[in-house]
Amino acid sequence: MKRAPVFRRASTPTRNGGTERGLSTGKALGQRSRMLHERGIALMAQDQSAEAIPVLNQALALAPDDHNLRQCLARAYFTVGDMGAALREYNEIATRFPHRGDAFSNLAGVLSTMGHQELAFNAIDRSLAIDPGNTQAMLNLAEILKNLGDWAGARDVYAEALKVDPQSHKLHMQYGMTMVALGEWPAGWAEMEHREFEPGVNVHTDSVEAPRWDGRASIEGKTVLIMHEQGLGDSIMGVRFARDLAARGARVQMRTPPHLVGLLSQAPGVEGCSEVGSPLPPHDFYVPLMSLPACLALEPSHLDGEPYLIPQGECPAPIAALLPKDGIPTVALSWQGNPRHSNDRRRSISGELLAPVFDLPGVRVVALQKYPTVQELLPVAMQERVVDLAQVCDTFVESAHAVRRVDLVVTVDSAMAHLAGATGTPTLLCLPFTPDYRWQLQGDTTPWYRNMTVLRQPEAFAWEPVIHEIVARVAALR
């Protein structure tokens, strides 16, 4: 007769210390892992992802099969820009949890960021096969399609995702930006109004009690407060709309970061300019800066591209001394944007790649790099071949004077591009293969700035053809 199996009670001790001790130890390790995990999350919330990484690795050593913990670690690596480590962790998650669609969606996201679009497409295809209704995966698919150059396909993916989740502000916002890129401006600007409700999108920070202007109410004789939002370049680009409001009879007040008060107060149509955080000036209506295109039903044909930010007064003597009018062609370079920008890896150019421009004889090369500095971005040998204007340009007004004294500005997609365009200086704008929506998708001109020529990457991360074109155009100045 077969005997029934005998099961020990969990509390029965054994000679080596017992199951009870094993369970107790396991519980203690689990608690320690959770404590470390929570500490890592707290550090990341304080923008200290680099400090969070060793903490999260300690936690992972105690709980290697904790999905959420591995996700947190992978995200920390991604945040600090260690793409190799992020890819390793996301790949490990997909290997350990092959039944999870989000694992393959996240893997696709990091692969796409690194430029491996075909591999990313395969991963996102696996993700959607597991979970067809995952709108985050659909968002990732749309981004991959844009990185492959299929913006129309991306627009259609957003439209399908909105059928699944019509209340998603992020989907509406991304849908709108894609439509603007494709030239569908009024409908796209309207969709982008959802950005205000999306966490993490910088709209405006001051509390305003006045009614919001919707583009329809009469503003004749009224004061309208334009609220700063997003980046410095957005404010330089958007201050042009003060003229449109003034043409409707409004008195326009601008709200900006302190760096821009002096410059934007000189813009046509602006009656006054105050910095964010200071007491609000009296006003009858307010409107977020990037809502003005929707309020005005903006079309490309509405933009004349003419300069609108000409700095007042004489050029400061220190700037004039570094930029003499001596007949030598002068080219100003700005090749690096804010490294904290989400797309900086694609939009910025390595300084070493610009060596052929620095090597051109008979041309004065100056740098319009405030942050990061020339010393941080260039080898010592190249630093000696460039005039660093950061030492004499402490404000945007001074930078505007400097820009007006050069013959050509060569810049990536940063605030400097908008400053050069707004001052009417001949400008070469260097764009990545996947450009920001406002520059649209083809052509070497832009309705935003008449004196700007757009140079586009032929494929992702391919700056060499762009540099070749820059060299040819700079050489022609001689």
Image: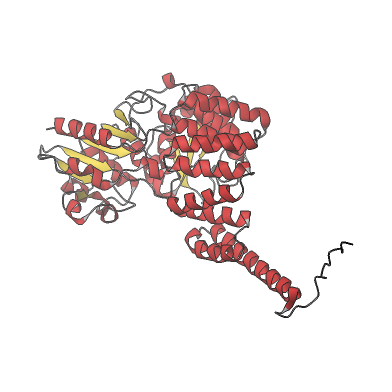
Residue 295 appears in the figure: no
Say whether residue 374 is left or right of residue 139: left
Residue nearest the observer in this picture, 359 or 222: 359
Quarter of the figure with the C terminus = top left
Residue nearest the observer in this picture, 301 or 18: 18
Say whether residue 130 is left or right of residue 442: right
Quarter of the figure with the N terminus = bottom right
Task: Name the spot of residue 276 as percent of width and height, x first.
Answer: 50, 48
Task: Name the spot of residue 323 as percent of width and height, x first.
Answer: 17, 44
Residue at image position (50%, 34%) is 121
Say whether residue 312 is left or right of residue 62: left
Task: Name the spot of residue 476 as percent of width and height, x first.
Answer: 15, 30
Residue nearest the observer in this picture, 333 or 300: 333
Q: How many marks?
A: 0
In the displayed image of the protein, which residue is found farthest to the right?
A: 1
Residue nearest the observer in this picture, 400 or 478: 478
Task: Name the spot of residue 243 as percent of width and height, x first.
Answer: 43, 29
Q: Is residue 321 above or below residue 42?
A: above
In the displayed image of the protein, which residue is found farthest to the top?
A: 301
The quadrant holding residue 432 is: top left
Residue at image position (26%, 33%) is 465
Residue at image position (22%, 54%) is 379
Residue at image position (73%, 80%) is 15
Residue 384 appears in the figure: yes
Identify the colour scheme used.
secondary structure
